Amino acid sequence: MDSTVIRDTKVGVLDKAMRILQVFPGGDVALTPQQIARSTGMPLPTVYRLAHVLSEHGWLMKEGQQFRLGMTLLRLGAMVAEGIDVRSRSLPHLRWLKEQTSENSELYIRSNESRVALEVVRSPHNLGAFVEIGAPLPLHVGAGGKVLLAWLPDQEQSDLIAASVALYSNYPLSDMQALKSVLAQIRDKGWAMSEGERASDVGAIAAPIFDVSKQIVGAMVLAVPIVRLGEKERAAYVPLVCDAARRASLDMGYLAQEKHAI
């Protein structure tokens, strides 16, 4: 728990219960009623009574003579996290990416063995979008699809690649292990690039978006006509895509801990 000051709501019991919950610095800490009483300044009998009531409702867990934060808090926290919409959280960063590059920015999510564009912010240079929102596309082809695969467990990767190849037979795969090697490289450097894999005249740069549970939930993609994607542009665009994905991840509640995570 953080050190936010609990505001007095004039509902005495609720205020006291919140003061008790706020004492705990984290879910792995167990405190005795005496420790809680010292930290809150509340009488020990009051702490005993409220701590037992909170444990009955799952807000605290009783372990011998100590209490720790309960599973109800975890469940409610997960519900809040699930309610955070990756599209709405990513849209400002898609717009920023488009303005920095004057190229199409796209948001993809995985849907079973496919990837689907949730949002497209169009460049003023392009007559149309390179992808239709909601249209399923192969997961094993293109920078966006590979990013969505790269941070998955090994067996799940293999299963999804096989399913995508079977569903999108017009995009055959000759070497599963070669693709998995590419995915490992993508995960190591933190981004992917493709040229002409799905559409012959379009290239893409993609980076992962993670949520509060450190799971990949989307791919931030910059789609650029190959004629405008030279070495100079690639060098300039990669850090911009990675930064947009990083900030979208932070807005999803993600806190990066690993090298090359985002």
Image (cartoon, helix red, strand yellow):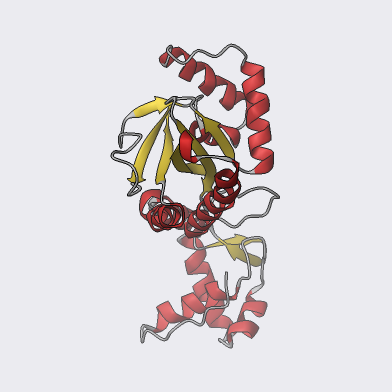
Nearer-the-camera pick, 100 or 142: 100
Depth order, front residue of 259/130: 130
Q: Nearer the viewer, residue 83 or 133?
A: 133
Q: Compared with residue 192, is residue 200 higher up or lower down, i.e. above or below?
A: above
Q: How many marks?
A: 0
Image position, residue 14 (x, y; %): 41, 77
**Eyeballing the image, is 15 above or below 217?**
below
Q: Residue 25 sits in which quadrant?
A: bottom right
Residue 150 pos. (x, y %): 59, 34
- Residue at the spot 59% in from the left edge and 76% down from the top edge: 23
Q: Quadrant of the N terminus?
A: bottom right
- Residue 146 seen in the current view: no
Q: Quadrant of residue 117?
A: top left
Compared with 63, 195 (above or below) is above
Asked whether the viewer can see residue 194, the reply is yes
Residue visible at 49% across and 25% down in the picture: 197
81 sits to left or right of 233: left
Residue 220, given in percent of the width and then of the height, sits at: 47, 45
5 or 122, which lies in front?
122
> In the picture provided, is 170 more to the left or to the right than 152?
left
In the rendered view, would you say 5 is above or below 202?
below
x and y percentages locating residue 146 in the rendered image: 54, 31
